[in-house]
Image (cartoon, rainbow, N blue to C red):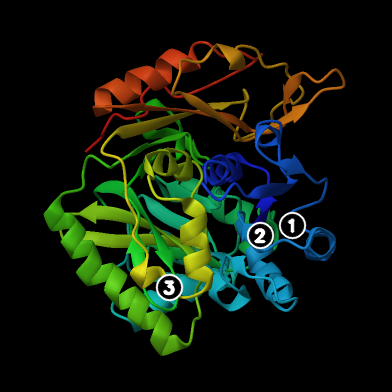
Amino acid sequence: MKVLIVGGGGREHAIAWKLSQSPRVPELVCAPGNAGIAEVARLVDADAEDVDAMVRVTKGESPDLVVIGPEVPLAKGLTDEIESLGIPVFGPNRQCAQLEASKSFTKAFLARHGIPTAAYREYTDIDALKSDIGIFGYPMVLKANGLAAGKGVVLAKDAAEAERAIEDMMGAKVFGAAGDVVVVEECLRGVEASVLCFVDGSAIVPMESAQDYKRIGDRDEGPNTGGMGTYSPSLVFTAELEAQIKERILDPTFNGFKEDGLDFRGVLFIGLMITDEGPKVIEFNNRFGDPETQSVLRRLDTDLLDIFVAATEDRLAGQEIRWSDKRAVCVVMASGGYPGAYEKGKAITGLSDLDDGAICFHAGTKFGPGGEILTSGGRVLGVTALGATHEEARAAAYRNVAKIHFDGEYHRTDIGVVYR
């Protein structure tokens, strides 16, 4: 079976790595991929966000299945274009992709179906937004409505910081058209957690839980990033909490898809805040989270290819999905300056020195002219390790982080610590 993976980050490396373990021995092709993905898949040089280019690649490769990793091609309707060729796709269509591409679309969906979330208001006029500064108190949560690479959320601690964020989003357009509409929410208090779910027309099946660390600095300080590390399973999850999530969030979401005619096939990522009132939805994403995927797929015992195929055929309800009891921790190694300006092209050493069982998922890497591996992004690597206990997994991840070096490298030192 031939599988085309669209994307070139850490999430796609984790997907490709897991698919490469399939007993069905699939032929893997990835566009554009990265230096790590090249170890398990043939790379095709193409822009994952260019729908026309990806359609040309798909026609040229004639795969049996296409797996779309990033959110931008999903929002642009790549699934619809490829399915029109008669090729199955794991990844939601353009209509469903609005659940991530539009914060206001998701908030309306949640409200319509009685799914717990933060109170909110949306704005299209900068002056109206400025006049409502502090409407839900502080910190004031401001979200660019469209896609902003995981960075379009600001928690302003006071009016001055809120005004600067408004000017950035709606005035200076630092997130482009994503800031044409800004959603303001009340700030939920609690512990963040993530649940990724396989979804098709027959079922919504939660994967093992994970916890992400969004801010750049230790103790969750500094600006938001695309994610500086994760661990799985989340230490805040209990059987009682999982039952609440199923009853209050998963079931009404799946029923809402049916009622609204949303033919969702792929992964629904649910960002949660575990509050004193129970779990509430922070956001929906339409794909595997990054770097949640790196820790979650390390614990998947079932053939991922079987799951993907079952989802494209609406057979998830009958698909067995098994998970390891081991714990996983993923620590992101980033370029100095990220999420602001940073330099690329730094040589990476130590990748071959990792312990057995530790895996370094590549997020922003490329090959140099001599075949050496260089940095090419803000988040560069995701060092992921397993352990019989959470503490063992955390120690193993950081032990292997210490073996890898590149100029300007930065990582958080507290991935796996729970702040309540």
Q: Quadrant of the C terminus?
A: top left
Closer-to-camera residue (88/165): 88
The reply to whether callout 2 and callout 1 are in contact (CB within 8 Å) is yes
Instruction: Identify residue for label 1.
Output: 49
Instruction: Identify residue for label 2.
Output: 72
Residue 361 position, x and y percent, is 56, 32
Q: CA distance from mark 3 to mark 2?
A: 27 Å
Q: Toward which corner of the image does residue 141 lie, by quadrant?
A: bottom left
Q: Could you tell which of marks 2 and 1 lies nearer the N-terminus?
A: 1
Q: Could you tell which of marks 3 and 2 lies nearer the N-terminus?
A: 2
Residue 139 position, x and y percent, is 36, 49
Closer-to-camera residue (101/34): 34
Q: Can you say whether 180 is above or below 143 in the image?
A: below
Q: Toward which corner of the image does residue 279 lie, by quadrant?
A: bottom left
Please tell me how crowded label 2 is: few (under 14), some (14-19), or many (20+) other residues with Cα within 10 Å: many
Q: Amino acid at mark 3?
A: Arg
Instruction: Identify residue for label 3.
Output: 315
Image depth: mark 3 or mark 2 in front: 3
Q: Amino acid at mark 1?
A: Glu
